[in-house]
Structures are given as C-alpha cells and as structure tokens.
Amino acid sequence: MTQAVCILGVTGSIGQSTLKVLEQHPDQYTVFAVSAYSRLDELLEICKKYHPKIVVVPNEKALELQQRLIQENLKNIDILTDEAGLITIAEHADVDVVMAAIVGAAGLLPTLAAVKAGKRVLLANKESLVMSGDIMMQAAREHNALLLPVDSEHNAIFQSLPHDYLDAERTGQPQLGVSRILLTASGGPFLNHSLAQLHEVTPQQACKHPNWSMGQKISVDSATLMNKGLELIEACHLFSISEHFVTVVVHPQSIIHSMVQYVDGSTLAQMGNPDMCTPIAHALAWPKRLATDVPALNLFETAQLNFQQPDIIRFPALDLARQAMRAGGLAPTVLNAANEIAVAAFLQQQIRFTEIPQVVDHTLQAVQNAKAENIDIILQTDMIARQIAEKYIVNKGG
C-alpha cells in the first residue's frame, strides 16, 4: 500500500529533492498534491511526470495553468488557489504525508492545518515553528500528528537523541540523559570577511552558498547567520529545550550536521555529505530507513573537520534571534517578519547586507511584545512588524 504525499512548495530546492527521493520508491509513495508559487514551467513538467490529483497556485496563475494543462492533455488534475487551496491539500483526507517546504510565514497556516489533521508532517518550513512554536507543538500532541524535522541540523539532532525523546516530558530542561545540543553552522560564504567587506556584499554573492544548493531567501539568511538564529528557535520548540542549552558551533565543512551531548561525557554526531535527500528520506520513512542516491561519506577524503565560535559582532543576527527566543511571546514572530522584509529589500538592492540585522533590531524594539496566545495575534503581529520594517527601510532612503 503506497502513502500519498502532498508537497507544499514543490518547485523549490526542498520540493525538488523530495521528488527525487519519492521517484526512487514508487512502490511506497505517490504524489497526491503539490503547490507552486511562480515557476509554472517546472510545475507543468512535474504534472506531466507525477500526475498529482490536485495542484495549488496563486489565483492569478490559475487560468494560465489550466490552459497549459489542457494543451498537454492533462485532464484529471484539479486546480485550487491561494491559502485556502494550500490548507485544503494539507489537511486532505487522502493525504498521509505533508512536506511543508513553503518559504517564510506563508507556510504557517497550511503547516498548522496538516498538524491538526494528524498527518506525518515533514517540517522544512522553519518560519512556521518560529512564529507559532508552542501552538504548533501543542496541536501536534493533541491531534497525534508526527512532526519530523527536515532541516539537516534538526534532523541530525533528532537522529542523535534517544529514540523516544519526542515523548519525553516537555519542561525546557534536557531529558533522558541529554545535557546539551550543539547546533552546527557552516558560517556561510562570508565567514572570514571583515565588517568593511560585509558592508559591500552584493545579493549575487550572498546567494552563492559554499556547500548547499538553496533558494535565495535561505541563502541570504545563511550568510547573515539569521538562518542559524531561526534554527536555534526551531530547536528550542521541537525538542522543548531552553535556548541556553543550545550552543551554535561554526563548522565550515558541513559534514557534521549537529550534535547532542550527554551527561556521561558522550557527544553523538550525525555526519553525511551535504545533500537534503538524506534528511528528507529519514523523515519520510522514520523509524525505518530509505535508500537514496546520496553517496556515503568517504572519511579518507574528508581530511579535516574544523570548529569555531560564531562572531556575533560581525554577524549580530544570531544574537538577535537568541534575544527574541529569550524574550518569548511574539518576539520571534517580529524577528522573522522583519527579517523577511529586510532580506527582500537587500535582494532588490534597497539596503546593504549589513543593514539587514539593523532593520530586524529596530523592528524588535518598535513592536511591543506580548503573549503569543493564538494564531490571530501572531498573524496580526506579523503584519504590523512587516509594516514597521518597510517604513524603516523607506526612511533610511532605501
């Protein structure tokens, strides 16, 4: 019996890697539904190859997609639109597994819908957990959803923890003999740049990661270390651990994907070549294992593994994220919203690379923090934070 998979964000790098894994196991998985935002050419190819039953696109793309599906004689594919469509496929009764790979806050409500429908949710959209942390985790427990991390670092932590760790009591303290989580960071393409050099960084340079093939937003986040900040918050929620039990370790080779330290002095690390197919396959099949095309690590070629502390003077975004997690409530939502606006402005060359954390810092200080009591408050705060960040960028003369 095959499992039906829904891929939210199918044309992105995670979506494409997911298809690659599924393709190798047609006896176990079928593609039931997919969503895409703008890349219709790629979406059409996916429809031709995998024949999903439902496709979700923005409303303004629906007519064009419909015409192109007719031209290709693809008749049995339903088209749904916008957020309502995303929620429909995420919670669809025929879906077993949801890959949540939409970038940014846009992924929040569809991911939450999948969790509330009790699905196996493969979480690649870290922003949804950054924004809704406690609400998302509570919903997973109440609806018996399996929320499995696909981010390579969180997947590595998950693999290095005791197998029943997600069932442990959620207190903010490490459980079951765990003492600390070591969250690895590549350091991005500008690890050794001076502040003066960082000031001159271009969007093109920021989007070229030395180890991973990723989309624009996450590549810029990786370069500012904000990605690691968001992952720090995600780790705290996923594994119910206070931020002071999570140490960020810069590891430029991206071979060790993260580590867990234990009270007996042991440190367990998950290692592998930097390829997202590995954590995707792990989350798809857990607790079993699924074969992929990722070559095993050749330790004789991996001559050196280096580690260093992150520099929060040159990369203040990481510290801003830690402060937001410490403050709790709506602060992580504000952090995420301001960062999304700042990254978009940088990609459009409205602000400099070094101004991204300045926009975030300003917005964090300008928005009053409160309890993240429900999704409506979170979404309202997200909107306010975006407006404040945008206004700040305009006033800077961006």
Image (tube, rainbow, N blue to C red):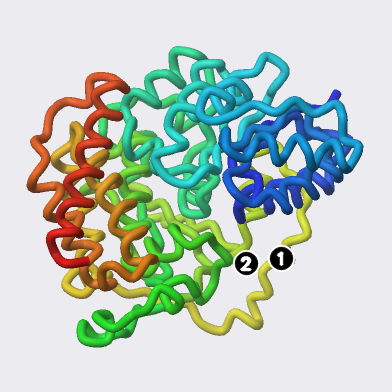
- Mark 1–mark 2 Cα distance, whole angstroms, equals 7 Å
Q: In the figure, residue 35 lies in which quadrant? A: top right
Amino acid identity at mark 1: Ala
Instruction: Please give left or right for residue 144 compared with residue 191 in the image.
Output: right
Q: Residue at x 39, y 66 (%)?
A: 347
The answer to which of marks 1 and 2 sits earlier in the sequence is 2
95 and 74: which one is in front? 74
- Residue with the mark numbered 2: 273
Label 2 environment density (alpha carbons within 10 Å; few <14, some 14–19, many ≥20) = some
Is residue 8 among the parts visible in the rendering?
Answer: yes
Q: Are marks 1 and 2 in contact (CB under 8 Å)?
A: yes
Q: Residue at x 47, y 54 (%)?
A: 153
Amino acid identity at mark 2: Asn
Q: Residue at x 37, y 44 (%)?
A: 235
Residue 150: percent from left, percent from top: 55, 45
Instruction: Please give left or right for residue 111 compared with residue 339 in the image.
Output: right
Helix, strand or loop under label 1? loop
- Residue with the mark numbered 1: 296
Q: Which mark is residue 212?
A: none
